[in-house]
Amino acid sequence: LEQWDKQYVWHPFTQMKQYVNERPLIIERGKGSYLYDVNGRRYLDGYASLWVNVHGHNDPELNAALREQLENIAHSTLLGSANVPSILLAKTLISYWPGMAKVFYSDTGAAAVEIALKIAYQYWKNIDPVKYAKKNKFVSLKEAYHGDTVGAVSVGGMATFHRIFAPLLFERIEVPSPYVYRMEKYGSEQDVVRYCLNELERVLASQHEHIAAVIVEPLVQGAAGIIVHPRGFLKGVEALCRQYGVLLICDEVAVGFGRTGTMFACEQEKVAPDLVCLGKGITGGYLPLAATLVTEEVYAAFLGEADEDKTFYHGHTYTGNQLTCSVALKNIELIEQRGLISSVQQKARRLAERLDALYEIPIVGDIRQKGLMCGIEIVKDRRTKEVFPRAAMVEHRIVLEARQRGLIIRPLGPVLTFIPVLSMSEAEMDEAVRILFDSIACLYE
Ligand code: PMP
């Protein structure tokens, strides 16, 4: 299997020569917070299988929901027909977002974003193609990540993902994001927020006639290295969007479904976007499903007579698939039934105390956390905040060390990310932090 994996499978992001001699980790099964490889070794899933797993692997109730759905039907199309799970799921999702009216289904976070961008772009043309002819650009944050499709990378701020594909689908204007750890020259946390909002205002004031929407990852920029935005930033972005008449798209793909300690991140600042993108945890980590939610006002712009066709020409083959929607419905039901959100809050507080001990290791520069989303920034020099050269692969070596000790985590540049299965127990989390400590400490001689 190892040989065939190397021979046939193109894994994302790992073509660098350094990885070639590494033995692949081949997962065979999972139970709760643990993954088991084909050799029977077990690992704590400190990555929630790419930030998706909510109730643990192999959950009996999610399994049962899927089996029950399979007994009826696996898939029929949403084009020209409807199905029960997708109707019930849409109603459930809307119940969490009072400002939202319609759910558009897709299958990956990138697609949910792509759809939001296309809707936002077309929205203005549908309202008034002459008046809004120039409203074509998107604003996003420095180091933003919204997925890998061409539309999604064109609003992304991580150059490695889009650099060679220029010119991209959409024109993007970048504004600074409040990365407090590396913006000390601007002053306190709130000074950093004020600076970032002022910059956004400058852009909107001068260019709002050219801007269709602002897109943000609410509260935490995940892929950028778990950059936690201080309180007030998101609310400030919303206020500026309203003031200058541009749409606000909140990309909750990573932060939604309990990850940051509330069902959705926008709740924490009482923000009501025009469009919302959901994915990852929506099925509890079982199957690929994503959704874009829009307000009645946005949806209304797409209604028109045949002779003034305002249709949104977009539709995926498996959109609103019964298996994915039924497991998503069960996932949400279990989040409520099991009191998952309050347990995440409680576990997050304990985890913060435990993680603090990592500061004993001099190469730990900054620990950032929101709910159960944690980033540990590794630095060569704590005072200057200089990071290790990429070729030294320090973070990658820490990750391999942790794997040896039974914990799966991943690096994002110089940032180690610990994003556990949401149902991980306190004891398991303590064990994970112990392994993290030892794995970082042994790299520091
Ligand atoms: N938006 C955000 C904020 C994300 O973190 C991600 C994935 N990490 C995506 C979009 C893209 O989701 P997917 O990988 O499912 O396409």
Image (spheres, rainbow, N blue to C red):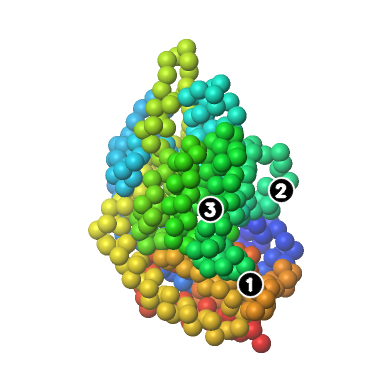
Q: Residue lying furthest bottom in this view?
A: 445
In three-dimensional space, the C-alpha distance between marks 2 and 1, rounded to whole angstroms, equals 24 Å
Identified by mark 1, the residue type is: Glu
Q: Residue at x 50, y 39 (%)?
A: 244
How far across and down, in percent of the image, does residue 321 sit? 40, 39
Q: Residue at x 38, y 45 (%)?
A: 272
Q: Residue at x 30, y 57 (%)?
A: 335
Q: Which element carries disc 3, helix, strand or loop?
A: helix
Q: Which element carries disc 1, helix, strand or loop?
A: helix
Callout 1: 10 Å neighbours few (<14), some, many (20+)?
many
Q: Which residue is mark 3?
A: 197
Dot placed on the residue nearer the N-terminal end, 1 or 3: 3
Q: Residue at x 60, y 38 (%)?
A: 207
Q: Nearer the viewer, mark 2 or mark 1?
A: 2
Can residue 89 be spotted in the picture?
A: no
In three-dimensional space, the C-alpha distance between marks 1 and 3, rounded to whole angstroms, equals 32 Å
Identified by mark 3, the residue type is: Leu
Q: Nearer the viewer, mark 1 or mark 3?
A: 3
Q: Which residue is mark 2?
A: 163
In three-dimensional space, the C-alpha distance between marks 2 and 3, rounded to whole angstroms, equals 26 Å
Q: Is mark 3 within 8 Å of ligand 1?
A: no
Asked if the residue at tag 3 contacts the one at tag 1, i.e. Cβ–Cβ closer than 8 Å, the answer is no
Query: Taking 278 as reference, is 314 above or below it?
Result: above
How far across and down, in percent of the image, does residue 149 sit? 60, 43
